[in-house]
Image (tube, helix red, strand yellow):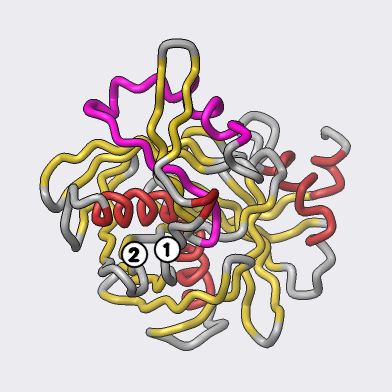
Amino acid sequence: MEHKFTKYHGLGNDFIFMEDLGGTLLPEGEELAKLLCHRHFGIGADGLVLVTEEAGLFTMRIFNSDGSEAEICGNAVRCMADYLLSKGLVEGPVLQIRTLGGTKEIQAIGGLYKVDMGEPDFSFAGGGPVSIGFSEQEWICYPVSMGNPHAAVFVEDVDGINLAMWGPTLEHDPTWPNRANIEFVQVVSRNQIKVRVWERGAGPTLACGTGACAAAVTAIKQGFVQGPVQVSLPGGDLTIEWKPGDHVFMSGPAAKVFTGRINLEAIKNGR
């Protein structure tokens, strides 16, 4: 049986969207994500999003390319807002989407999507900073939860970081109970930071919405920048607004790439 899908990306962070209002695909989410997200044997993506319905709201269930389920994804929630609005499933310009990391309110503004990401939780992993050392290298990590676990690491030259080495090393450090997304952050000016992300369960991605939020609020909290903050990621820029004690607001684009149909049984059988 063929299933419809839509490919989206938010600043190059790409996702496969499938409607699963009946909940038939959800139990297979882990397996499907591994198969469909594979860039050689599947469609190719950083994650699989199943559009479900729970508690009377459209709900985003997102699985990373390694099959692990994430609580929330900032880029994916903007893409889901575009998906729901473009298909006429909801009315805009303001809508709500339920996630495992809480219900998010999204506003469509002039081709961009502004998401209320809630309040950051700086008590994650006991609060920071946390020193993590490996042989002669020591990393000062600032933990923060945006509904999912993050650690921001400030560096002088973000492009000089060996992301393939240090990303997974820090992600899997026992400091984090369920692993963590790692953001390497370079302060460019009082209103701009440059970020490279190693995403938990997906590896290096061109952008990460919750990661941009985590990096920006940590930089503001440490007094390195002031809001609004332009977060420059490999795939483009996001704007993050936050004042201590308030909610975090993320603004950025969402782009539909293509739609198609796929035979799930065939891909499971390797054909």
Give the structural element (helix, strand or loop) at label 1. Answer: loop
Q: CA distance from mark 1 to mark 2?
A: 12 Å
Residue 8 appears left or right of 101: left
Tell me the magenta residue range: 147-174
Q: Residue at x 47, y 60 (%)?
A: 146
Q: Residue at x 52, y 67 (%)?
A: 80
The residue singled out by tag 2 in the image is 250
**Of callouts 1 and 2, the N-terminal one:** 1
Q: Where 219 sits versus 66, above or below?
A: below
Q: Disc 2 marks which amino acid? A: Met
Which of the labelled discs sits on residue 120, or is there none? Answer: 1
Q: Is residue 161 visible?
A: yes
Q: Any magenta on residue 156? A: yes
Q: Is residue 113 visible?
A: no
Kindly report which numbered mark, 1 or 2, lies closer to the viewer in this rendering: 1
Residue 122 rendering spot, x and y as whole percentages: 43, 57
Q: Disc 1 marks which amino acid? A: Pro
Q: Residues within 10 Å of mark 2 (few under 14, many from 20)?
A: many
